[in-house]
Amino acid sequence: MTAARNEFSETAQLLQELLLRKHIAGFSTGDVWTLRFVENEYQLAFQNFSCSKESSINEALRGHDMALFDCADPDGIAKAAILSSVTMRKVMSASVDEDAALSLVFEGDIELIFNTDTDVVDWQWCVTKNVPNPYAEEYELACFWKGEVSHRNRT
């Protein structure tokens, strides 16, 4: 087994332990987004995510009230609605692809993909206990760059 395959296997196992079958307690937005889990003390912090439902939510909202989009982060409106919809739902699957994008599928078959293509930051997503920043607190998992996932006590 190659070192890269061992890394992927370890990442997958840690994801299962930390996130699988856990409920989302809530979310926050600001400089970064966070999802807080009910059953443990962990949170998932991330720069961005995508969901197949974004465009239809944006279309519906724009058709109803364009003034909603006159704000600092119009892309965040649909994203906040999506995160609200997964609150108190269980994570049914968790995986990381070769680019280190994290995929979570929730009850109701809602898939969120935590991308690794935000280019103005020095980390993409992380799982921590208290602070939503892998530099400010020891992290369990963190994606600093596309294709690279680091584990606690590892680089």
Image (cartoon, helix red, strand yellow):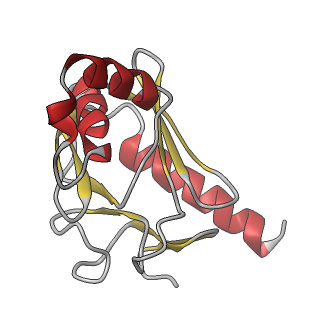
Q: Which residue lies at the image location 38% right of the left edge and 31% below the top edge?
A: 21
Q: Where does residue 32 sit, x and y in percent of width and height?
A: 25, 62
| Residue 132 versus residue 39 in the image, above or below | below
State the residue in front, 67 or 92. 67
Placement of the N terminus among the 4 image quadrants? bottom right
Q: Which residue lies at the image location 48% right of the left edge and 19% below the top edge?
A: 109
Q: Where does residue 67 sit, x and y in percent of width and height?
A: 15, 34
In which image quadrant can residue 68 be found?
top left
Q: Left or right of 72: which side holds 15?
A: right
| Residue 8 versus residue 60 in the image, above or below | below
Q: Where does residue 52 sit, x and y in percent of width and height?
A: 50, 29
Q: Which residue lies at the image location 42% right of the left edge and 80% below the top edge?
A: 122
Q: Left or right of 112: which side holds 99?
A: right
Give the tally of numbered discs: 0
Q: Where does residue 105 sit, x and y in percent of width and height?
A: 47, 30
| Residue 105 versus residue 16 in the image, above or below | above
In which image quadrant can residue 108 be found?
top left
Q: Which residue lies at the image location 24% right of the left edge and 30% below the top edge?
A: 81
State the residue in front, 86 or 24. 86
